Image: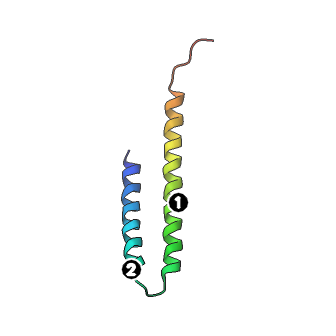
Amino acid sequence: MPELTYLRTILSLLAAHWRSSRSDERGSGTLEQILITTALVTAALVAGGILIARVTEQAKAIPQGAP
């Protein structure tokens, strides 16, 4: 699942950036927090979509009994 590895890397980088920007008090924090929050929500939605697609795919592969 390379998609999840890619998402995990992005989330780690965003979290590190967010932690470092919290200690910086120059005033542009609100816009950065909005952008980071948007990126995190988007990443979560993408991860959820991938998981739902994989679970649905596996569920369809379950053999059904003959009617």
Colouring mode (rainbow / by chain / secondary structure / one colour) = rainbow
Question: Pointer 1: residues within 10 angstroms few (<14), some, or many (20+)?
Answer: few
User: Looking at the rendered structure, which numbered label has been put on residue 55?
Assistant: none
Label 2 residue SS: helix
* Residue type, mark 1 in image: Thr
Mark 1 or mark 2, whichever is nearer to me: 2
Q: Residue furthest right?
A: 67
Compared to residue 38, the image places residue 45 above or below, namely: above
Please tell me which residue is depicted at 40% across the width and 66% down the height of the picture. Answer: 15
In the depicted view, which residue is nearer to us: 15 or 63? Answer: 15
Label 1 residue SS: helix
Give the CA separation, mark 1 to mark 2: 25 Å
Pointer 1 with pointer 2, Cβ within 8 A: no
* Residue type, mark 2 in image: Ser
Q: Quadrant of residue 16?
A: bottom left
Horizontal side of residue 57 vs 17, given as left or right: right
Please tell me which residue is depicted at 56% across the width and 18% down the height of the picture. Answer: 64
Compared to residue 61, the image places residue 33 above or below, namely: below
Residue that numbered label 1 is attached to: 42
Quadrant where the image shows the N terminus: top left
Compared to residue 15, the image places residue 2 above or below, namely: above
Q: Residue furthest bottom?
A: 26
Image position, residue 9 (x, y; %): 36, 59
Question: Pointer 2: residues within 10 angstroms few (<14), some, or many (20+)?
Answer: few
Compared to residue 40, the image places residue 17 above or below, namely: below
In the depicted view, which residue is nearer to us: 33 or 3? Answer: 33
Image position, residue 42 (x, y; %): 52, 60
Please tell me which residue is depicted at 50% across the width and 65% down the height of the picture. Answer: 39
Residue that numbered label 2 is attached to: 23
**How many numbered circles does the render carry?**
2
Please tell me which residue is depicted at 41% across the width and 61% down the height of the picture. Answer: 11
